[in-house]
Image (spheres, rainbow, N blue to C red):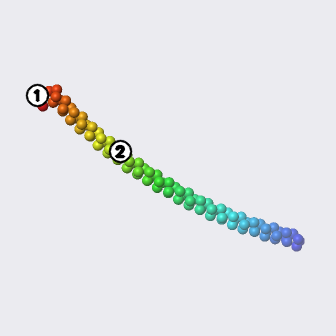
């Protein structure tokens, strides 16, 4: 009877030790996952900031290009109107 009791106690101690070791390993893995999750969150925030900066830069460049194109178009239209008036005067001098 003592032998059976000793074997059962030994098995209980082994199970208890292996359970503690398993819990410690699991705790380490959870901590690693938390660190990884935080790293991923940091990467997402960094990428979001880069995207916002890129979009802001793109909008700024589009505005500059739009203003340049508008100025060039206005200049061309002014030149076109002046040429039109010159031609109108040369074709119909009495009209002007």
Q: Is residue 52 above or below residue 71?
A: below
| Residue at the image position 26 percent from the left and 40 percent from the top | 75
Which residue is labeled 2 in the image? Answer: 65
Q: Is residue 86 left or right of residue 5?
A: left
**Mark 1 neighbour density, 10 Å: few (under 14) some (14–19) many (20 or more):** few
On residue 94, the disc is 1
Q: From this viewpoint, which residue is outermost toward the left? A: 94
- In the rendering, at what x and y percent does residue 43 appear? 53, 56
Q: Is residue 16 above or below residue 70?
A: below
- In the rendering, at what x and y percent does residue 90 appear? 16, 28
> Sequence order check: which comes first, mark 1 or mark 2?
2
Q: From this viewpoint, which residue is outermost toward the top? A: 91
Give residue 72's quadrant in the image. Answer: top left
- In the rendering, at what x and y percent does residue 71 appear? 29, 43
The N terminus lies in quadrant: bottom right
Q: Is residue 9 left or right of residue 73?
A: right
**Mark 2 neighbour density, 10 Å: few (under 14) some (14–19) many (20 or more):** few
Q: Nearer the viewer, mark 1 or mark 2?
A: 1
| Residue at the image position 15 percent from the left and 30 percent from the top | 89
- In the rendering, at what x and y percent does residue 51 appear? 46, 52
The C terminus lies in quadrant: top left
Question: Which residue is more in the foreground, 33 or 62?
Answer: 62
Q: Is residue 35 left or right of residue 81?
A: right
């Amino acid at each position: 009877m003592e032998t059976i009791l000793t074997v059962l106690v030994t098995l209980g101690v082994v199970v208890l030790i292996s359970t503690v070791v398993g819990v410690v390993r699991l705790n380490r893995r959870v901590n690693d996952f938390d660190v990884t999750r935080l790293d991923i969150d940091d990467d997402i925030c960094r990428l979001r900031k880069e995207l916002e900066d890129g979009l802001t830069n793109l909008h700024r460049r589009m505005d500059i290009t739009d203003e340049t194109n508008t100025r060039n178009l206005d200049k061309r239209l002014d030149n076109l109107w002046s040429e039109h008036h010159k031609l109108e005067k040369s074709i119909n001098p009495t009209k002007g």
